[in-house]
Amino acid sequence: MRVFPLKDAPLVLLSLIFFIWGLITVSSNSLIPHYKEAFSLDYKMAMLFPMAFFITRITVSLPTSFVMAKIGYRTTLKFCLIWCLLGCLAMAYLVRGEELVPTLIGILLMASGVSAIQVVSSPYVSLLSTPDKSVIRQSVATASNSVGTVLGPLVLTAVILVAATFNVNSTAHQVSFLFLFIALFFLGLLVFLSKISLPDIKPKQMTGFWRGLTLLVKNRQFMKLALVLLLYIGVEVSFGTFTITYLADQQYGDLGLVSATQIIALYWVLMFMGRLLFAKFGNTINKHALFSLSCVVAALISALAIYQNHVWVGYLMLVVGLCNSTLYPIIYAQALHASGKQNSQGAAILIMCSIGGVVLPFVQASLIDELSLSTSYIAPALAYVLMIVLYWSSLKHRA
């Protein structure tokens, strides 16, 4: 087999994987207001779509971690890429029926592959380097993820606008074209994987898989950091979803749904810029202080949104993307280090924490239905405060 002669090709491949799952995740989040309108749902019922997407983190993560511990990272990665390819094709087919249940099934099948590949690729990035460089490599990969999150809303709106020029106005058919394009991307990744030399890793565990999982659940530092990650993913999804609603709603931004979907790309642009800066200067700053500062600023913007109902508040919410930019690499690197020898189980649990992308947005959606959009921002404000408390509490348990 001919090997593709690219320096650090494994990091390139894994960064591309981070990129496409970022694009898929944000596109799926950005579609929630469109699904809400297409199926005439209230905010709580519209949360069925992110629930279908993120619930796979619970159902898929541990089985994938178990397989990864048995056959190694490289082989598992190959199977996960195939899974993603088939899942996107299934989503593209089922969504064309323009019915709620088949659409949810399509999301489940597609998201299962995305969840599985996250379990493999997230620790793979760190484990292919020395411990002192793992945070920076994680930042490079998450920066690639941010490129995907930036392009997600833009690709989505481009699909909508291009499809409209061909008189394809159905949301279902537009989404179908989007996932056919993503399936082709996964096919390209499979070809790339076959052409490079990717070092294999088998988790070195001192105990059996389930025994190791039990030890990890009893690890107070790891579990607190896992909860911080759960809250972080919740606030990231909340701002990525409801800022679109805020900017589009007549009572607040009054920009319309398509324009608001385009503008939300700035939220992900700022996250991308922040992660690039962190990748370059991350070793020269106090990561704990940066974590706290980012959470405090984001909490203050959330609190401001409760009391002010103007379009400029919606634009200010985009700055939360910059606040969030450094949180994931800091939390993930700390948590993976805390997992010790149980890194495969740790990776599964951390991916399962993506369920926060359902929990917190559902709480905020319920507040919107019962109270108002502006009042609902009390949920992310409190989440950021709790993140600070749990993070600093976890530091007390460091060995």
Image (spheres, rainbow, N blue to C red):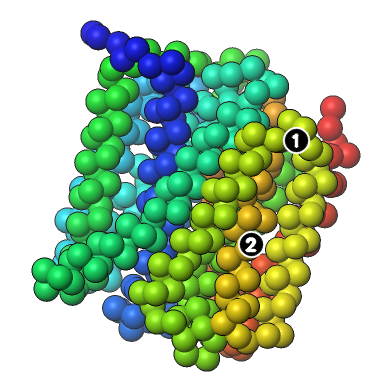
User: Which three-letter amino acid code belongs to the residue tagged 2?
Assistant: Val
Where is residue 193 drawn, in percent x and y?
32, 23
Which residue is the extreme one toward the right?
A: 396
Whether residue 63 is visible, yes or no, is no
Q: Residue drawn at (88%, 39%), measured in percent from left and top?
A: 396
| Residue 270 place in picture, x, y as percent | 57, 55
Using residue 158 as the reference point, say whether residue 325 is left or right of it: right
Q: Quadrant of residue 4?
A: top left
Q: Is residue 361 left or right of residue 106?
A: right
- Residue 325 visible: yes
Is 376 above or below relative to 146? below
Name the residue carrying label 2. 320
Mark 1 / mark 2, whichever is N-terminal: 1
How far separated are the C-alphas under marks 1 and 2?
31 Å
Front one among 203 and 10 = 10
Q: Residue at x 39, y 74 (%)?
A: 259
Query: For mark 1, what is the residue?
Result: 219
Q: Is residue 5 above or below residue 239?
A: above
Q: Residue furthest top?
A: 1
Which residue sits at x=57%, y=48%? 273
Q: Position of residue 230 (x, y in %)?
A: 62, 52
Instruction: Tell me the quadrant of the picture where the C terminus can be found.
Output: top right
